[in-house]
Amino acid sequence: MNKILIISEHNGSELSNSTAKCVSCAIETGGSVHILVLAADAADIAAQAAALNGVDEVISINHPNYSHAMAATLAPEIAAVGADYSHVYGPSSTYGRDLMPRVAALLGVNQVADIMTVKGSRSFQRPVYAGNAIIDVSVAEEMTVVATIRLASWAAASGGNNATISSRETTAEMPTHSRFIDLKTEGGDLPDLQSAKRVISGGRGLGSEENFKIIYALASKLGAGVGASRAAVDAGYVPNDMQVGQTGKIISPDLYMAFGISGAIQHITGIKDAGTIVAINKDAEAPIFEVADIGLVGDLFTVIPEIEAAI
Amino acid sequence: MKILVGIKRVIDFNVRVRVKPDGSGVDLDGAKMSINPFDEIALEEALRLREAGKASEVIVISIGPNACQQQLRTGLAMGADRAIQVDTEEKLQPLAAARVFLALVEKEQPGLVIVGKQAIDDDNSQTGQMLAALWNRPQATFASEVVLEDQVARVTREVDAGLETIEIDLPAVITTDLRLNEPRFVKLPDIMKAKRKPLEVIPLADLAITNDNKLTIDHYAPPASREKGIMVDSAEALVAELKNRGLL
């Protein structure tokens, strides 16, 4: 029977939604589902992990060196614990994409990146060429399946469970060659882009950093996260962590509204799992209209006040 | 200090990718091929470090058939000192590619290996991290700023939460994100000069790497397309439609 180990993602106190999405993928894969929590103080996070439905056991390991998620520090312990499992899953966030290949190499296997669909307990679908092709990937019986889970493809597992929590000590040697210095977050009070149910994005059509305020205003009225196209980021209107697309964040809100975004392929890659895509652009020929569920040709500076009035 | 830079030959990022009707792969016939854009940034960073006096030699490496010499020559024209082609017809998976790099690391003893954060063909984003693991050295992935001091690199990384800065001891592996730099354009005289720079061809077999535990990739399909949307003619109609669908 499959034994699946999920590597939890957290910020030191709260479990990320990405872990609950990995649980959904593990349930689909089939087998017993364990979550590994490595943290400086793992107790609260382990309790949150144990509450996820479908989880059989949570393993928590405390160590002061786990206060910041550094792949080089975490990977040896994960590989040691993971050696007893048939599958080791992590999220396809920057955390998981940094960490899981390092784990895979220590276990001597290639990693399956970005699982979209589970076709069998060892066969999966994943995107390549920026989502322009989907491939079938399968993993031979003798190999550990080490994989990252594409977050936009999976819903979070529900809560209400009370799985067993066991504590362990670290066993693997920890390197000293990598040190955390600091983390600067730029988002402010807006909902997190990855988990927001509604996202309002602006593109080069906004014209300036100052003009972007109308996007923030509409977003706060709708309780939405704010995103931007790469063009808007490159023009300096907004910081890079707001970038949506292949080279930024890949998101799947229920509602995505794109203002003044032409719809480059790399942007579309980041939004095509959204429930409903709305595009507002003054250029009727903009490629964004090809993927939009609802399109409106018009000047965003007149349309936005009209939308606010009509809500 | 030497810097090794991995450059992969991939379909140009401007080319629209189409899946072959028989599902055997994507159609590359006659398509423009280029250096993977993230790898081009890796090379640019290495060249800037050399120009700042922090490195002595920049070596570009590509794994693939003779066709990838074209990308190596471009790398030499950009300013790399020499090139190595690890010759193979097989498309190596990340673990084998990392083992190839490890073999070359042992031979060249670099202070840094810089590669793109991912290749835009298979979008795996694994080779750099795997090399760091096999080499038992630090990794700084998704770099947007690299500051090199004596035997230490301070690297700012683009992570989901914002910008993370870490400090790593050298030797180490860095993988590059898009905002690290803007690669230079190649000038014609440099292309001529690049023809005289050394390009070593090493048959894959000579490196005696283990090439096992491959994933089986058996079918390519185009992505599911979204249903055709509707156009509305006013903000009021848009809001009404969104309310109608329960989205507002």
Image (cartoon, rainbow, N blue to C red):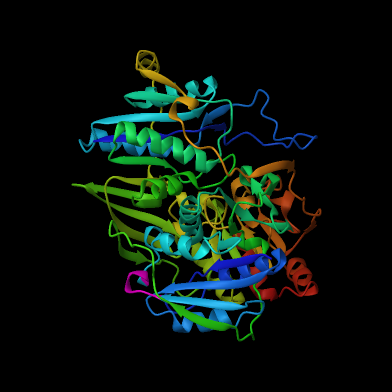
Is A231 in front, or is B71?
B71
Q: Dividing the image into 4 quarters, which one contains the N terminus of chain A?
A: bottom right
- Left or right placement of residue A237 versus residue B189 in this view: right
Name which residue lies at 59% across and 30% down. Answer: B90
- Left or right placement of residue B233 versus residue B214 in this view: right
Name which residue lies at 39% across and 14% down. Answer: B195
Name which residue lies at 81% across and 53% down. Answer: B228
Which residues are drawn in magenta?
Answer: A62-66
Task: Give above or below for A308 relative to A172.
Answer: below
Is A68 in front, or is A263?
A68
Q: For residue B225, say whether it is visible.
A: yes
Task: Give above or below for B76 relative to B181.
Answer: above
Residue B236 in the image: state x and y as whole percent. Answer: 74, 69
Residue A131 in the image: state x and y as whole percent. Answer: 65, 47
Judged by its main secondary structure, the magenta piece is helix
Residue B127 in the image: state x and y as whole percent. Answer: 48, 44
Residue A152 in the image: state x and y as whole percent. Answer: 64, 62
Name which residue lies at 38% across and 55% down. Answer: B157
